[in-house]
Image (cartoon, helix red, strand yellow):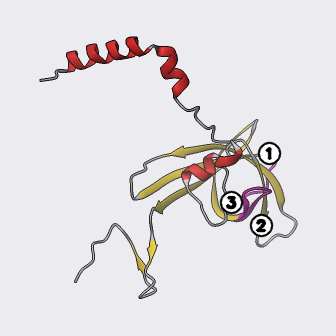
Amino acid sequence: MLTRRKFFISSAVVVTSLGIDSLVRASPLPTTPNSPQERKFLENDQNYKNFLAYQGEVFIVSSFDDQNLSEEVELVEVVDTWGTDQLDQFWLRFKALPTSALEKGVYHFEHAQAGTIRLWIEPAWSNENGRYFEAHFTLLKNFLLSQSQNEAVSPLREDIS
């Protein structure tokens, strides 16, 4: 029987015999969240991973009601709060100027590569560096549209027959 101690000892022997240098060269380099191949158009695909690719980027925010309201905000944080195989839960934190006129509500967020999206934001706090706003998400993953009945079918619910 392979015990934990024997596993670690045998693993060390394998790594030593192969040489750590060959293992490091064989592993692929990780992609950074802001690499161009990871950035997606957010209009149709809003999820944690796609927003993470835009962290540190500036968005133009405009109001539905006030045509004169247009401000730049920076996406300063994308936080995964509780994700599972079926749920994508996360929140975004945006930073505006200390003199920002933004309040709680729905706004258009525009970005050259991300497109235009609508988000509900709420003020989180203010300090001398700016005003901070948050948008919270709870999204179902793999939400399927039944083509035969044109009704939404969730993988969380078992079919009752």
Q: Which residue is mark 3?
A: 41
Depicted 84 relative to depicted 120: above or below: above
Secondary structure under the numbered disc 3 in the rendered image: loop
Q: N-terminal of the two: label 3 or label 1?
A: 3
Left or right placement of residue 87 versus residue 67 in this view: left
Q: Amino acid at mark 1?
A: Leu
Q: N-terminal of the two: label 1 or label 2?
A: 2
Q: Amino acid at mark 2?
A: Ser
Identity of the residue drawn at 75% across and 57% down: 102
Residue 38 in the image: state x and y as whole percent: 64, 48
Q: Choose mark 3 or mark 1, whichever is in front.
A: 3
Can residue 94 be seen here? The reply is no
Whether tag 3 and tag 1 are in contact, CB under 8 A, the answer is: no
In the image, 66 versus 86, the foreground residue is: 86
Q: Which residue is mark 1?
A: 97
Secondary structure under the numbered disc 1 in the rendered image: loop
Q: Residue 105 falls in which quadrant of the image?
A: bottom right
Identity of the residue drawn at 59% across and 31% down: 29
Left or right placement of residue 99 versus residue 125 in this view: right
Whether tag 1 and tag 2 are in contact, CB under 8 A, the answer is: no
Can residue 13 be seen here? The reply is yes
Identity of the residue drawn at 52% across and 21% down: 24
Secondary structure under the numbered disc 2 in the rendered image: strand
| Distance in Å between CA atoms under marks 3 and 1 | 26 Å
Q: Which residue is mark 2?
A: 63
Residue 25 in the image: state x and y as whole percent: 55, 23
The magenta-colored residue range is: 98-116
Residue 104 in the magenta stretch? The answer is yes
